[in-house]
Amino acid sequence: MSARKDTGLGFSTRMSHHGRAGAKEHGFVNPPIHRGSTVLFPDCESRKNSAKQRYEQVLTYGTAGGPTHHMLEDMVAEIEGGTRALIVGTGLAACMVPLFAYLKAGDHCLVPDSVYGPVRNLADGLMKSFGIETTYYDPMVDEAGMAALIRPNTKVVYTESPGSHTFELQDIPAIASAARAAGAKVLMDNTWGFHTFQPFAHGVDVSIQALTKYAGGHSDVLLGSVTVNNPEDWQIVKGASSQLGQFASPDDCWLCLRGLRTLPVRLRQQAENGLQVARWLETQPEVLRLLHPALPSHPQHALFQRDFSGTCSLFGLVLQPRYSDADAETVVDALRLFGIGASWGGYESLALPTAPSISRTVTNPKDFGGPIIRLHIGLEDPEDLIADLTQALGRLPR
């Protein structure tokens, strides 16, 4: 599931050794947490020189980050295959910073209809009030279709693959080709494909992560990252982040660093658990179909095989059309081992009825055929989760 870099070391080895002193260094295994606001300088000249390097990993002021932030930046850039990563306070902040970095009044932005709900709220709210126009597009658009949507003032093509709640995959290389030809930047929310999809190898300019999810892995941090692959984009996103006052707690950064040490084994096990549960669900009479890109039944499974090196444990299930949204809530309420929560990527399993909260303006969520429940499969024994789902589905009317 893990790709190898030029170092010749596997992903698990890199996550174990990167961002710490090294196996032969005397001292504690994990680096210390560096907290601070004021940075002191030996003289005024040193302070002036530091200010000139404010976009580099130097100590200037607390909001610019410190050694703990810098270690996490390096690890995220390593995972995403980029050159520089910016750490911000939340996943939504990671979505916001590059949008405001590349867009201004009078500009046009293209956003997939399946986008993460808070990004839609941002586009329809602050971005609109600032004079930025957004057009939503069918996430399964091809290169010609994307080219037809791009206007002279289109500056950003936003992508998210797979899409929130409904898990449509996007043909990122095709979309990126059309955007590049028109001079537009491609932004991608790559949280689902963390380390299994290499954004920059597929034409993406800026990759967005909610580090709150698998990177943290324990449902106890809020963090986001923005990764780029060239100095020009770094200057743009880092400058916007600084002007917006974005900052991430060093304590959360440290917890995320600790989470990354075990990411490979957690993600591998959760992916296996998720596939086992999903394959079982496909055989159940109450279930119409599964929304899981790694399953052969998924409409874009061939795209998944082409672009992804592995999967994660977040997917959707569609109940038979005879059931209602209220029936979906009955199933979720009956589950004993699944929490009801909006996040995912932690060690615990979650379930959420999502159909009522899906907003669409181009595509129709009713086209999926029935009520949708989103499942995140954790590190519990999959046999126990299947037993729990069995009794919960048994509450449905016959």
Image: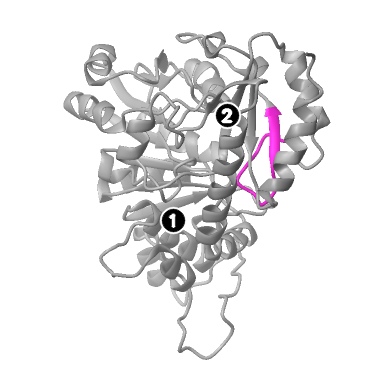
- The image quadrant of residue 180 is top left
Q: Is residue 351 magenta?
A: yes
Q: Nearer the viewer, residue 10 or 184?
A: 10
Instruction: Determine crowd level at label 2: few under 14, some 14-19, many 20+ residues with C-alpha closer than 10 A.
Output: some
For this view, does 286 lie left or right of residue 213? right
Mark 2 secondary-structure assignment: helix
Residue at horizontal 77%, vertical 21%? 329
Residue 105 x/y as whole percent: 39, 19
> Percent from the top left, x then y, of residue 283?
60, 28
Q: Where the C terminus falls, by quadrant?
A: top right
In the rendered structure, which amino acid carries the disc numbered 2? Glu
Which residue type carries mark 1?
Val
- Cα separation, mark 2 vs mark 1, equals 35 Å
Indicate the position of residue 238 as horizontal and vertical percent values.
40, 47
Q: Visible in this render: residue 151? A: no
At 45% from the left and 27% from the top, the residue drawn is 297
Given residues 46 and 349, the one toward you in this image is 349
Residue 76: image tag? 1
Residue designated by label 2: 282
Q: What coloring was used for the rendering?
A: one colour
Determine the image quadrant of residue 125. Answer: top right
Q: Main secondary structure of the magenta part?
A: loop
Asked which quadrant contains residue 251, the reply is: bottom right
> Can residue 136 be seen by looking at this rendering?
yes
> Which residue: 56% across, 21% down?
121
Q: Nearer the viewer, residue 1 or 65?
A: 1
- Secondary structure, mark 1, is helix
Nearer to the camera, 153 or 262: 262
Q: Which residues are magenta?
A: 341-352
Q: Residues within 10 Å of mark 1 (few under 14, many from 20)?
A: many
State left or right for residue 323 relative to residue 162: right
